[in-house]
Image: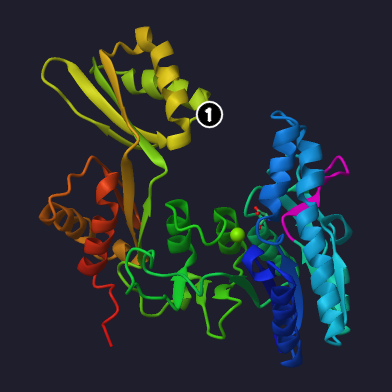
Amino acid sequence: MARIVMKFGGTSVADLDRIKNVARRVKAEVDNGNEVAVVVSAMAGVTNQLVGYCQSLSPLFDAREYDAVVATGEQVTAGLVAIALQELGQEARSWQGWQVAVETNGEHGKARIESIEGEELIERMKLGQVPVVAGFQGIGPDNRVTTLGRGGSDTSAVALAAALKADQCDIYTDVDGIYTTDPRIVPNAKKLSKITYEEMLELASVGAKVLQTRSVELAMKERVRVQVLSSFADIPGTLVVDEEEVVEKEIVAGIAYSRDEAKITVRRVPDRPGIAAAVFVPLSEANINVDMIVQNVAEDGTTDMTFTVGKTDMARALRCLEQAKSEIGFTEIISDPNVAKLSVVGVGMRSHAGVAGTMFKTLADRGINIQAITTSEIKVSVLVAAEYTELAVRALHTAYELDTSAC
Ligand code: ASP
Ligand code: MG
């Protein structure tokens, strides 16, 4: 017997037939002798619609009222899933965030969970009842409903699993696991049976958006075993686990890409102490995150500084730099939104040399120019022209021998 948290995303509860399917899957786990708590998202599209309502009424809406509106999506699903379970003869009860209670800080619209009261739910599970908890929401210090930021019901599920001391948190979604890369680009990408928290975090942060990044951070901190699987297929998914649990460590677990960044080059700034601060402090003060940075040394005492920012921040970053022009002393700024960041991720890199070299050589063989590079202990990222994204991902996937053998 195990205690399991089952989380169902928007596509898994998109209509009443799918909600019945969810109820069947939950009941099957209970019938197998497990204690089960369920966390649900809003039905597919509902949150977008609710956000749209707020924006249409007021571009600068009050965040507390936004939360009051958008939290309703999950409340509807929780009630419907409880009804569907009862209809199958399975005792169930829905719970909104404040009823549990899921306590958060006061940052409306992007609140963080601070604590979850688990005792009552545990008691009920022991008696055979299935709690169906509305994800994405909690209650703030002001005693008002809060929401956790888009995609936040993954975090609700992991936090609940930690609070209930669950053996596993199964996240049901519309993909059947984590792949070595995007299967839309590489049809013979492999499904991973296991991946470490750290690899998952790196992949999530560079664009493989199956799980909300924060949920992976929380799972790693609380050591919650997470499984990503499909609610439409009856096959095991991918386990996201501690490194010790992965026996056969691949050197490279996966390849991710992101088209969310833009490149900015500040030309011919004086090459002297304080110049990086002059460029980057104004950006950080404007809350603009800088990712990759390259600085070249030129011979005439000036240098070019190239870096990336989020595409949505590009215009703001350019304005910010123009305003600081006299302090920085550049001649020109060049910007390019048509770039893609490719990342190779794997914990095996810690003990294997040559991963970066293989990446650079593979791209060179295809004539793809590398515009910037960053590395971490378990990741190498490069910036290339966006038009090469697919070609580069395919070439790298083959180079690291990740393709499934045709059968
Ligand atoms: N319904 C919320 C959203 O669409 C939360 C979630 O699904 O995780 O962002
Ligand atoms: Mg999601």
Residue 348 location (% of width, % of height): 32, 67
Residue 288 location (% of width, % of height): 48, 30
| Range of residues picked out in magenta | 135-145
Give residue 219's quadrant in the image. bottom right
Q: Quadrant of the C terminus?
A: bottom left
Query: Is residue 363 placed above or below 31 in the rendered structure?
Result: above
Q: Nearer the viewer, residue 48 or 372?
A: 48
Give residue 69's quadrant in the image. top right
For badge 1, the amino acid type reads Asn
Instruction: Specify the color scheme.
Output: rainbow
Residue at the spot 56% in from the left edge and 75% down from the top edge:
230
In the image, is residue 368 part of the stretch drawn in magenta? no
Query: Is residue 376 placed above or below 183 in the rendered structure?
Result: above
Does dot 1 land on a helix, a strand or a loop? loop
Left or right position of 230 against 65: left
Note whether residue 243 is visible: no
Picture quadrant of ligand 2: bottom right
Residue 80 location (% of width, % of height): 82, 69
Residue 212 location (% of width, % of height): 57, 56
Mark 1 lies on residue: 287
Q: What predominant SS class does the magenta segment belong to?
A: loop
Q: Quadrant of the N terminus?
A: bottom right
Residue at the spot 68% in from the left edge and 66% down from the top edge:
14
Give residue 123's quadrant in the image. bottom right
Q: Nearer the viewer, residue 109 or 60?
A: 60
